[in-house]
Amino acid sequence: MGVLLAAYTETDRAGQVRIATFRDTLQGLGWNDDRNIHFDYRWGGNTANVKSLAAELLQSAPDAVLVAGDPALAQLSKLPSTIPIVFTQVSEPVDSGFIPSLARPGGHITGFQNFEPAMGGKWLSVLMEIAPNVKRVGAMYSSDAAPHASFLRATEVAAPSLGVSISIVDVQDSGGIERGITTFASQPDGGLLVFPHPNTIANRGSINSLAARHRLPAIYPYRYFATDGGLISYGPDQIDQWRGAARYIDRILRGEKPADLPVQAPTKFELVINLKTAKTLGLTVPPTMLARADEVIE
């Protein structure tokens, strides 16, 4: 069983939690590491080496592969292989060309979709609700992630009605994140919209610190950004999707084909607010927002 985790290093707690969930679910379905399954991991932490990691993993000829993230799946899909692949943390599998349709994937790839393109506008709306004085929003964008273009278009469509302008903060180069945020923060009334990407995930500690240093309200796609000190997150229940990925792997290892397993969209989204960070930024969270939050971090 091959596992490609471009977004997480081996010591990243968020990655460890997801892998533990995946393995525990498989164990409950009868797959035990000591008896009938072996896991071959490729950990990343950025996109710089994902191409070589993908090729190396497929060369080991696993019976199936679990992959997390758009850039990692993009590299796997380019390689000449029919090894079954189950993905998670992927936003636009059809528009990216990984599969022909959600209902009928039709090939050797299927999995669990994270976000639709309209999420860009939703993230912007939530950010403006908690930080209404923001006038400029830096979208943390990478050209190697096809969904980012759709997220960006959605934010640009929503921006005029919310009274904000949108700028790009390039995150394709992990080393350039600090430079990009610092340059954006040189002008007042800014906020950040952090798109899902291996580089933003792996560098979330640095992004949170920079946002705090420059007093930039920021919204993030996953819960662990907020629990690690970020202001607010809005995104799917990822843990549930990793359980689903394990169930799909089980079905494939027992003989079903990825082509017959429809891609699943998220059914539950979580709003997490870090009240401590809000207070540090001088923000008062509206009572209506607090009331609908799934988790409030004091």
Image (cartoon, helix red, strand yellow):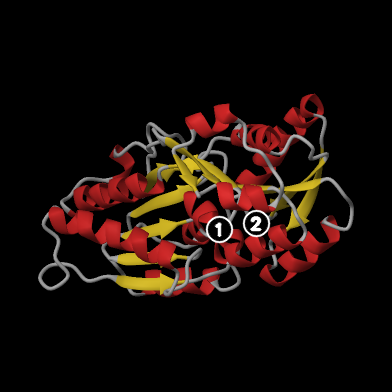
Q: Residue at x 35, y 45 (%)?
A: 241
Residue at the disc numbered 1: 71
Give the residue at mark 2.
144
- Circle 2: is it few (<14), some (14-19), or many (20+) Cα within 10 Å? some
Quarter of the image with the N terminus in it: bottom left
| Tag 2 and tag 1, C-beta contact below 8 Å | yes
The front one of 218 and 193 is 218
The image quarter in which residue 184 lies? bottom right
Q: In this view, does 159 lie above or below 12?
A: above
Instruction: Name the secondary structure under disc 1.
Output: helix
Image quadrant where residue 59 sits: bottom left
For the residue marked with disc 2, what is the amino acid?
Answer: Asp
Estimate the x, y position of residue 54 in percent, counting from the top left. 46, 68
Total residue callouts = 2
Of the numbered discs in the image, which one, if any, rests on residue 169?
none
**Does the rendering let one see residue 114?**
no
Q: Which amino acid does label 1 sit on?
A: Pro
State the CA–CA distance, disc 2 to disc 1.
7 Å
> Where is residue 212 shown, x and y percent of the image?
70, 59
277 relative position to 25: left or right: right
Lateral position of residue 207 relative to residue 298, left or right: right
Front-most of residues 253 and 124: 124
Residue 197 lies, with reference to residue 156, above or below; the image says: below
| Residue at 80% in and 47% down | 190
Q: Residues within 10 Å of mark 1 (few under 14, many from 20)?
A: many
Q: Which residue is farthest right?
A: 187
